[in-house]
């Protein structure tokens, strides 16, 4: 059942109407905690205007009669408009960070996009899930998974895209490309999706960097437009946002790589709906300290992330 169908048949609209403004207001407060210079970028100002407009539209329904069919229909139409307005929340936030880095020459915070509440579900990529998943299921046994479609779509699209790109770039001179293999396993607690490729893998020291926002091995994309299509690559938020989607309902996303061979990406989802509980943030003063405080020192002495050429160093007398 679609969201619009549910709302049209559900009489508990006052509860729905209250929950949505609260969540939008919380996200707006979280955005206000970001650095002032980041908030001054055109993309962040546009993003804030979207949330302010959506909040005002929803607040207008709080005093309306939910038994009025015309009001109910108008409320449903407003939700659809809000969903469409927020289609590009994630790439717009990423574009704002790009603008910040171009203006000030540094990444404001590696964790600034670690907001546990995902944006309103929308179409997050230009291709269709059928094309992507056609190689991930047998011809006689269609794969059926009960999950938020846009969340699962984004995670699978990102992992398939990365696997295919690595495979093509590693074996560009080969006559036949090695396949990208998918295995789905349902256990008593977890539903696990494993996507494996032979795209050459990545060094161990780069695994965590792949989950850092704004880190990408692809060229930077052009400015985003107002369409429903998101850029294929280049912003650097694909993997960290995918892991955020997985964790939203108590799951996870992990990468296991063998440099010189390939990489396996594993999505862990809860098998039982009773355990798939939303992971909501707590909005308080600790949130702003999270953005303003530098990261604590590690318990271990860590060398530079990049290997040094020791031959260039000479012993001083």
Image (cartoon, rainbow, N blue to C red):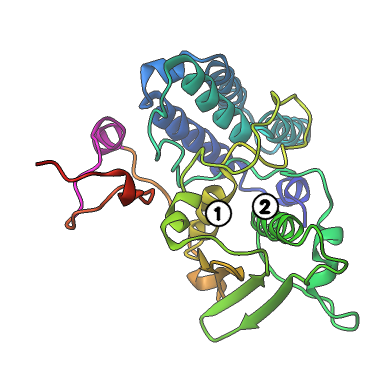
- Nearest the viewer among 217 and 146 is 217
132 left or right of 30 in image: right
Q: Which residue is mark 2?
A: 154
Residue at image position (54%, 86%) is: 188
Instruction: Determine if the magenta segment contains residue 12.
Output: no
- The residue sitting at the front extreme is 317
Q: In the image, residue 225 lies at what x, y percent?
A: 74, 24
Q: Give the farthest residue toward the left.
A: 317
Query: Could you tell me residue 35's position as x and y percent?
Result: 36, 22
Q: Of all residues shown, which one is farthest toward the bottom?
A: 188
Is residue 289 within the magenta segment? yes
Q: On screen, 140 above or below 286?
A: below
Give the numbered dot on residue 266.
Answer: none
Q: Image height check: is 186 above or below 254?
A: below
Left or right: where 142 falls relative to 256? right
Q: Nearer the viewer, residue 71 or 239?
A: 239
Residue at the (59%, 76%) spot, across then down = 191
Q: Secondary structure at mark 2?
A: helix
| Mark sitting on residue 245 | 1
Counting every numbered tag in the picture gives: 2
């Amino acid at each position: 059942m679609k969201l619009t169908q549910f709302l049209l048949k559900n009489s508990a609209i006052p509860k729905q109407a209250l929950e949505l403004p609260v969540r939008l207001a919380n996200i707006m407060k979280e955005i206000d905690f970001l650095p002032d210079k980041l908030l001054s970028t055109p993309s962040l100002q546009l993003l804030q205007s979207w949330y302010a407009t959506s909040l005002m539209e929803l607040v207008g329904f709080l005093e309306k009669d939910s038994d009025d069919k015309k009001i109910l229909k108008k409320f449903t139409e407003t939700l659809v408009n809000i969903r469409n307005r927020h289609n590009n929340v994630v790439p717009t936030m990423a574009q704002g960070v790009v603008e910040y880095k171009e203006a000030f020459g540094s990444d404001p915070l590696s964790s600034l996009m670690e907001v546990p509440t995902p944006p309103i579900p929308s179409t997050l990529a230009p291709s269709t899930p059928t094309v992507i998943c056609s190689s991930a299921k047998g011809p006689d046994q269609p794969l059926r998974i009960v999950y938020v479609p846009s969340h699962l779509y984004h995670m699978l699209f990102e992992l398939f895209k990365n696997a295919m790109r690595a495979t093509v770039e590693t074996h560009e001179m080969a006559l036949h490309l090695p396949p990208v293999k998918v295995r789905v396993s349902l256990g008593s607690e977890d539903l696990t999706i494993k996507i494996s490729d032979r795209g050459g893998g990545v060094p161990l020291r780069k695994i965590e960097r792949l989950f850092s926002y704004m880190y990408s091995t692809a060229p930077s994309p052009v400015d985003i437009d107002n369409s429903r299509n998101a850029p294929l690559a280049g912003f650097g938020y694909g993997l960290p946002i995918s892991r955020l989607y997985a964790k939203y309902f108590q799951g996870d996303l992990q990468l296991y790589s063998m440099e010189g061979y390939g990489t396996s990406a594993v999505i862990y989802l809860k098998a039982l709906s009773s355990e798939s509980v939303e992971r909501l943030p707590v909005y308080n003063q600790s949130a702003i300290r999270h953005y303003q405080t530098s990261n604590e020192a590690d318990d271990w002495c860590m060398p530079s992330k990049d290997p040094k050429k020791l031959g260039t160093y000479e012993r001083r007398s």
